Amino acid sequence: MGYRSDVAYKIDFHTDEAYWGFVAKAKLDPETAECFEDEAFKQDDENKNLRFYASQVKWYESYDEVDCHTKLWDNACEFELTHDANTDLCSGFFVRIGEEY
C-alpha cells in the first residue's frame, strides 16, 4: 500500500544555446539520462522545455526513478544560478501533492 503523489515539473529555457547545452549534459550524465526514457517525461525541442507529470505515483527518495528527476530539477536550478545573474537562462516549477507537502 502506501501513499501516492501527483508530481509535475516544467523547465523552460530562454535560449537555444541554454536548452541544447543543458539537454546534452543531462543525457550524458548517468544520474539524469534515465529521465529521458520515462514515458511521463516530455522533451519539447520546439518550445525549448522539459516537462514531467505523473499521477498517483510513489515518490520516495529511495527510488532510482525519483532520484533521477530530483537530480535533473536540481541541476536546472544550479544551471541557472551558475551563470550571469543578469541573464535568465531557464525558469520553471516543481509541484508535488500527496503524502508530504
Image: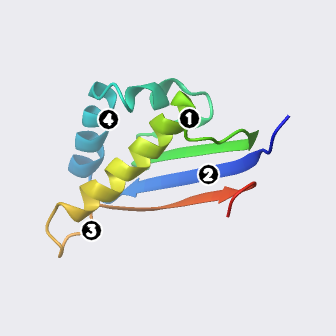
Give the residue at x 41% y 56%.
12
How busy is the neighbourhood of tag 3: few (under 14 within 10 Å), some, or many (20 plus)? some
Q: Nearer the viewer, residue 73 or 90?
A: 73
Q: How far apart are marks 3 and 2 (CA)?
A: 22 Å
Residue matched to label 2: 8
Instruction: Give the residue number, with chain letter if any, for mark 3.
Output: 88
Question: N-terminal of the two: label 3 or label 1?
Answer: 1
Q: Which of 77 and 12 is in front in this view?
A: 77
Judged by depth in the image, the label closer to the viewer, 4 or 1, is: 1
**Which scheme is used to colour this image of the protein?**
rainbow
The three-letter code of the residue at mark 3 reads Asp
Element type at mark 1: loop
Q: Which of marks 2 and 4 is nearer the N terminus?
A: 2
Q: Say whether marks 3 and 2 touch (CB < 8 Å).
A: no
**Left or right of 42, for residue 32:** left
Structural crowding at the residue carrying mark 2, measured as other residues with C-alpha within 10 Å and reported as few (<14), some (14–19) or many (≥20) = some
Amino acid tagged 2: Ala
Q: Is mark 2 on a helix, strand or loop?
A: strand
The answer to which of marks 3 and 2 sits earlier in the sequence is 2
Q: In the rendered structure, which disc, 3 or 4, sits on the residue that comes first in sequence?
A: 4
Circle 1 sits on which residue? Answer: 62
* Tag nearer the camera, 3 or 2: 2
Q: In this view, does 22 lie to the left or right of 42?
A: left
x, y (%) of residue 34? Answer: 45, 25
Q: Which residue has dot 4 on it? A: 26
Q: Measure how far apart labels 2 and 4 are at the Cα level.
A: 18 Å
Q: Name the residue rendered at 16%, 62% in the picture.
A: 83
Image x and y of residue 101, in percent? 67, 64
